[in-house]
Image (tube, rainbow, N blue to C red):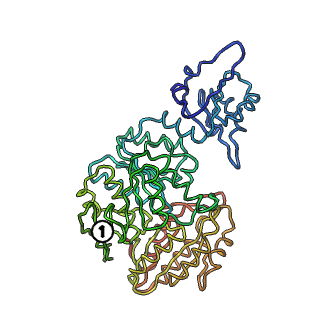
Amino acid sequence: MKLRQLLGAEDCQSEVTIDTADFIDVSQIDISGLAMDSRRVQKDNLFFAIGGTSLDGFSFICDAVDRGASAVVLDRARVSEARAMVSDDAVVLVGVKNVRLAVSRTASKLYAPQPDCIAAITGTNGKTSVARFLQQFWAAAGKQAGSIGTLGLSSKDGTRPLGLTSPDPLQLHEAVQAMALTGVTHLAVEASSHGLDQYRLDGLNVRVAAFTNLSQDHLDYHASMEDYFHAKCRLFTQLLPRDHFAIVHVDTAYGERVRELCLQSGRRVLPVGGYELANDGLRLLNEVPTDTGHLVHVCFDGVEYEIAFPLFGRFQLDNALVAAGLALATDIGVPDVMGALECLEGVPGRLECIGQSKRGALVFVDYAHTPDALMTILQTLRDHTQRQLHVVFGAGGDRDAGKRAIMGERADYLADRCYITDDNPRSEDPAEIRSSIMSCMDGAVEIPDRAEAIHHAVSNLAEGDVLVIAGKGHETGQHIGSKILPFDDRAVARQALLEHGGQCD
């Protein structure tokens, strides 16, 4: 594709520097590919010199040129400085106000087409469940559906991992194109605060968006909860076009703020929520826990529906209703949506029942790794616990340290027996992480080795007990130091159950 096509006037202000005898016509320069890492540059690539706190792409411009880059996009304030560094006068330097934004918009043009209908979901908790539930709603209605997020790329052909909730823009837009080329017409995309703040999702043709909730997380990256909140809001104020639908769970103060922000900025809102919600949205009238999930009554457009929801947990029901709102906003019929609510399958590692001990105690694995998520999962399982509620959990290293003591305090209050172990310590001292968690706890048992902690907890289960292993969910590795070692909570829990005379689902 031609450079001029890739970098339109709305994306950048270009500056071409050549020797005095020649003139380079930017419209005739062919670009063979895009790169953000100079080591991946190939002949006639367009290289983006992105500034950063640890590595500055500007320092690698010469390396990118030596490897064959024919053009470089960089901060327009540094174009003159770059020209003095680059020995090849034929290299085009493109100065832009926002290099990260230029990456995404350029990638969206090179990696066309995109699926006809893209739904983006943001929030602290529930993004993965909403995306996978929405994929199921669409598939049940006969659409070619897929999702991109924490679990990877998912479609009717299976799932493959990506590594990040919101991957880098080149990887993301290439994945979106791949989905479209394989026939996916309806795509659900998880939108993390990092991805939104770093413009990774810009350039996506978002047709509808959703907000689940907001609670403390990622304050190692964001300066405050307000900063975190406003990063999430970019989805509604800048990526979602005016007059398009935002599906907003409004049972919290943050949800109400998102609703007001959307209305003020010209977006349409379909609110989702509980008993106090007016009749202008998807309203939960009541829900009763059952042995298989919940018996639910909801109201939409003045009509009430009774639904046998097949999954445990009010939070799963909330996520399913947000997904239902997205399905309704993308022209899926009400009967199809209400019918599909009774057939939803759980998401791997999200309140996943692994089996039961020899005494009949249930064992679950969940991804809860924030204070609110851990509190929610424990409150949910308390309704299904006849005797004692057990929890095994830790906290990730190199992440928001402020949430660790809060998680410990909430677990100490809500669970009967707590086992504190390692999560993904990364570069931090695991003992210090565990100490932070236990600083607000009384009587928790510390078992550093995660497998040993799971086996110990399973061996201590009695009739009527429930155990949840929280924090890692679907993950199949444990990040210790610079290594990622094979580790799957679900596999270890199954092994523990079988070794101690239990059975697996």
Towards the viewer: 256 or 382: 256
Q: Is residue 104 left or right of residue 296?
A: right
Label count reads 1
- For label 1, the crowd category at 10 Å Cα-Cα, with few meaning under 14, some 14 to 19 and many 20 or more, is many
Q: Residue furthest front?
A: 264
Which residue does the image show at 30% across and 68% down from the upper left?
309
Horizontal and vertical percent position of residue 427: 68, 61
Q: Quadrant of residue 429?
A: bottom right
Towards the viewer: 140 or 95: 95
SS category of the residue bearing label 1: strand
Q: Is residue 350 left or right of residue 43?
A: left
Horizontal and vertical percent position of residue 96: 63, 35
Kind of residue at badge 1? Phe
Mark 1 highlights which residue?
A: 309
Please identify the quadrant where the C terminus is shown: bottom left
Horizontal and vertical percent position of residue 150: 48, 56
Horizontal and vertical percent position of residue 173: 49, 41
Q: Quadrant of residue 451?
A: bottom right
Which residue does the image show at 63% across and 30% down from the upper left?
94
Q: Quadrant of residue 117?
A: top left
